[in-house]
């Protein structure tokens, strides 16, 4: 039996977010004899790739540039007792991924007399590229809050239920390329801010006191 192979690859560079199942290339074999032709793929990380019975090579799992940047693989072609080994070197191309953002709100509602300079939320950010991030707040009530150096959202201005019944702003996280926006809405609870005092002219009334006469004042 005679056996020879030729490799055809779309590219040796693979973007890290390439979808599993994507075609990477193929092995074409020319052979004589009645033995069955078989293929195998091996090498560190070979579980991320697959070769079928016809020699087509596909991506089995999504790649991650931050974990592995190159794959040095071997493709084996078997025909009976004969075999041929082809070397396959692949490079993973970095894709700038959006940062993962979680805005943890302390409560879904605040009393309108909530103290300023206090924390109302925390921001957690995971940037896969670790390129550095910038956090800001925008939106309707962005002037009432700010972001501290420890990524806490602080209330800067007093709330007033009679003016606006909720606190609305957007947390924006920028990694140098991508911007992730997270809208935040916190209900404002009304607090009875009416107060009064009564000053009586005298704590004792005589039974002959004239009707509609003044007995005190309300302030």
Image (cartoon, rainbow, N blue to C red):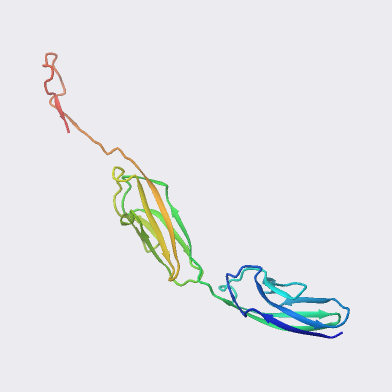
Q: Position of residue 113 (x, y in %)?
A: 31, 45
Q: Residue at x 11, y 21 (%)?
A: 213
In the displayed structure, would residue 104 be above or below residue 23? above
Left or right placement of residue 16 versus residue 135 in this view: right
Q: Residue at x 77, y 76 (%)?
A: 39
Left or right placement of residue 191 versus residue 127 in this view: left
Q: Residue at x 33, y 40 (%)?
A: 190
Q: Nearer the viewer, residue 23 or 213?
A: 23
Q: Position of residue 140 (x, y in %)?
A: 33, 54
Q: How many numbered marks have been drawn onto this rendered protein structure?
A: 0
In the displayed structure, would residue 112 be above or below residue 73? above
Q: Quadrant of residue 19?
A: bottom right
In the displayed structure, would residue 12 be above or below residue 101? below
Q: Nearer the viewer, residue 114 or 3?
A: 3
Q: Position of residue 125 (x, y in %)?
A: 46, 63
Q: Position of residue 13 (x, y in %)?
A: 60, 79
Q: Quadrant of residue 18?
A: bottom right
Left or right placement of residue 154 versus residue 56 in this view: left
Residue pushed farthest top? 208
Q: Quadrant of the N terminus?
A: bottom right
Residue pushed farthest right? 34
Q: Quadrant of the C terminus?
A: top left
Q: Nearer the viewer, residue 192 or 169?
A: 169
């Amino acid at each position: 039996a005679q056996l020879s192979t030729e490799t055809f690859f779309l590219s040796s560079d693979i973007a890290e977010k390439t979808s599993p199942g994507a075609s990477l290339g193929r092995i074409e074999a020319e052979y004589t004899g009645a033995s069955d032709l078989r293929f195998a793929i091996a090498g560190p990380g070979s579980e991320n790739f697959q070769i079928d019975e016809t020699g087509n090579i596909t991506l089995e799992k999504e790649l991650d540039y931050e974990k592995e940047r190159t794959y040095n693989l071997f493709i084996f072609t078997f025909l009976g007792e004969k075999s041929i080994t082809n070397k396959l070197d692949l490079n993973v191309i970095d894709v700038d991924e959006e940062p993962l953002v979680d805005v943890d709100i302390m409560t879904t509602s605040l009393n309108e007399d909530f103290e300023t300079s206090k924390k109302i939320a925390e921001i957690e950010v995971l940037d896969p590229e670790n390129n550095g991030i910038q956090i800001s707040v925008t939106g309707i009530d962005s002037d009432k809050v700010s972001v501290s150096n420890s990524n806490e959202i602080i209330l800067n201005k007093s709330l007033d239920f009679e003016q606006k019944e909720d606190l609305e702003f957007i947390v924006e996280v920028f990694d140098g390329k991508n911007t992730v926006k997270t809208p935040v809405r916190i209900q404002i609870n009304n607090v009875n801010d009416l107060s009064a005092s009564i000053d009586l002219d005298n704590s004792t009334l005589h039974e002959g006191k004239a009707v509609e006469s003044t007995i005190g004042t309300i302030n």
